[in-house]
Image (cartoon, grey):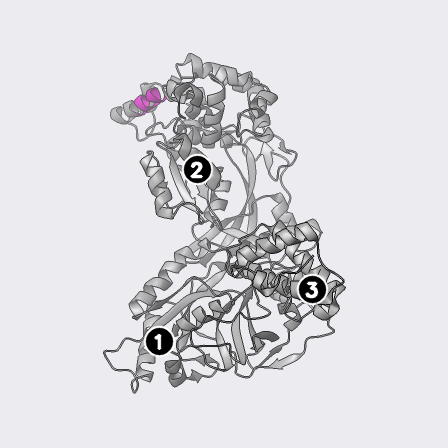
Amino acid sequence: MAAPTTSDVPSNPVEHTQVLLRRLEQNGMPTADAEEAATLAAQLREVVRFHDRKYYVEDAPLIPDSEYDRLFHALYVLEEAHPELQTPESPTQRIGGEPLDAFEKVAHPEPLLSLSNAFDAQDLRDWYDRCRQGLAGVLADDEPLHLSAEVKLDGLAVALTYEDGRLVVAATRGDGQVGENITRNARTIRSVPLRLSTPPDDGLPLPERLEVRGEVFMRRSRFDAFNERLRERGDAPFANPRNAAAGSLRQLDPTVTAERPLSFLAYGVGPAQGTVPPTQSATLDWLTRMGIPVSSQRARFDDIDAVVDFCEAWVDKRDTLDMEIDGIVVKVDRIAYQEVLGAIAKAPRWAIAYKFPAREATTTLRDIEVNVGRTGAIKPEAVLEPVHIGGVTVSQATLHNADYIADRDIRVGDTVVVKRAGDVIPQVVRSIPEARTGEESPWAMPARCPSCGSAIVRLPDEADYFCMASDCPAQFIRLLEHFAGRSAMDIEGLGSKLAVLLAEEGLVTRLSDLYDLSKDELLQLEGFAEKKAQNLLDGIEASTAQPLHRLLTGLGIRHVGRDVALRLVHAFPSLEALAEASHESLTAVDGIGPVTAESVVDWFAVEENQSLVEDLRSLGVNTERQPEEAPPEARGDAASPIAGATFVLTGALDGFTRKEAKTAIEQQGGKVTGSVSGNTDYLVRGQNPGSKLQQAQEREVTVLDEEAFRDLLEQA
């Protein structure tokens, strides 16, 4: 194979990539001719570095992983065949090396200072006033003091030193004066450039020596996957992303660090031999041009009021990021002004950290109770010593399932860490074994349903235990509320409190009893007068004409939400036909998998459920497919599953802005709300979904990815 000469190499890196891939495909790699191998290795290093930057720094990959792997493998083979071609900054040198006996100490040329904290808007304004006072001799009274602000990562601070654009030292913050040399570990982090790119001609060449300061962290999504791998191996999971990042970066064996999904974002520079930009905001732009990743969640402001708005807005938006942040760092933007202001003790005067309200707290786990959901799922719930978290007093929290409790060795009486993220249900994160007194007791799932006393079972491949009794009171109250809800039969006036009342008074013990209610019976209930009773009866009567997919949704069959119900009704013209459907005919329906099919078959196999369907039909409830529910081929279009439905959006969508997605839903008669509730029909999940995803899963709301959301819009 003839290696491309300089004149053959395209200036466009993407085109260059394709040229190299084609030549590798056609001719393989040279291993004998040293000059030819050296030329190809240099070009492969350039291309692999380019794609590393696009993937790990800019989060905008341009080629599939398979093509990247071919390029990387080609470079690795070349350098193995010609060891003299290896360079310290080659992408192949990120695999680690021999384990260390201990970390060397590194003295920082300038201290890595900590930050003073602000806990509210007044603290920020007081800091701003102090800065203006400190700059009284250089800043006119009517001159704006520009500020920069960026999210504060909850990671591990490090300093990267580059000489002539090459990474030579990486050190932890340590005590601010002396840190640990973690160079070999830092070199394994893909988002840490081993060699800086030369900035465009902007008058600022690469400094001879430059210290870049930033945070090593682990993204939430990668942390969850990493912890899952640890559990599969039988290893203890990490408590949170910060602990995982710190533990990974301080491994004596760099090959272990290389296997950990670490990331890096810079927040500024330290000492430099050479010219640097005059402002913090320009410095971050400059670092980006050199291939160093920085946060995109940053901005420059002309006054403190705008900064306060920025900080307070991020309190509610923090869960939209795929990284843990615990505040906003605000800095005087101009470097010259920073130098005038100087520092006090261990913190600069020119910067401050606006800290978010705490979302974690420790408290005592008094007890573990279990609740029964409408599908019979038995969920454990923590009863806590009340604790104040993020402005809310928390006395109960979810424990998810029995495996969650066992994996974390959570015991009754433990001191536990409780987390409240945004508007999600509080959850117990972990126990603190070191605080145990010996009086704590392990917990086990009860053998019988706390509501009806029936034996509970754990189905294959399920995390939850279930009560299988269809007459279980706890299940029925939730089922009745669901049946009457907006996404199902939409019975006006029948909400949570009335569902409990009707069930507890024995007036409604199965769904069909709703359609046998009389006015006299309702008037005997507390709070009911003539008009209220008649309105409820009118709402119940109106529900008999609801389309079949709404009835199917309301029956509470596991895995059958609104979207699945529409698909089933498109395929089967009546509830009777669906009841007779086989597992094979169900899985033949587009979008119906084997688990859902099994759930439908099992539900209709229960004699009590068959009786319920017949009773509903005989009481006048519609059990036939309506014309508007006809299959697409019969109508020329699809029934709209959006009209009347309530949506919640979370995460970033590729093809829509949040406003565009909201408009698309509203144009089809749907509604978009900001939080998940019992009335939510769909959660649309984008990239890096926030805590609303967990809420939706716990409430058994139908979750749509972007592709499924597009399909739904096309049906509409």
The type of residue carrying mark 2 is: Arg
State the residue in front, 4 or 102.
4
Read off the magenta span. 536-543
Q: Is residue 229 above or below residue 120?
A: above
Residue 605 image point, x, y percent: 58, 19
The type of residue carrying mark 3 is: Glu
Q: Residue at x 58, y 56 (%)?
A: 17
In-image side of 9 versus 286 (left or right): right
Specify which label sits upstream in the sequence, 2 or 1: 1
Q: Which residue is mark 2?
A: 710
Q: Residue at x 38, y 37 (%)?
A: 646
Query: On residue 36, which mark appears?
Result: 3
Judged from the image, the secondary structure of the residue bearing numbered disc 1 is helix
Q: Main secondary structure of the magenta part?
A: helix
Asked if the magenta segment contains residue 540, the reply would be yes
Judged from the image, the secondary structure of the residue bearing numbered disc 2 is helix
Q: In the rendered image, which quarter contains the C terminus?
A: top left
Q: Which residue is mark 1?
A: 127
Q: In which quarter of the view is residue 377 placed?
A: top right
Task: Give the number of the mark in front: 3 or 2.
Answer: 3
Q: In which quarter of the view is residue 460 placed?
A: top right
Q: Is residue 357 above or below residue 171?
A: above
Q: CA distance from mark 2 to mark 1?
A: 48 Å
The residue sitting at the bottom extreme is: 137
The type of residue carrying mark 1 is: Trp
Task: Say whether marks 2 and 1 touch (CB < 8 Å).
Answer: no
The residue sitting at the top extreme is: 618
Q: Residues within 10 Å of mark 1 (few under 14, many from 20)?
A: some
In-image side of 467 versus 303 (left or right): right
Q: Is residue 485 above or below residue 85?
A: above
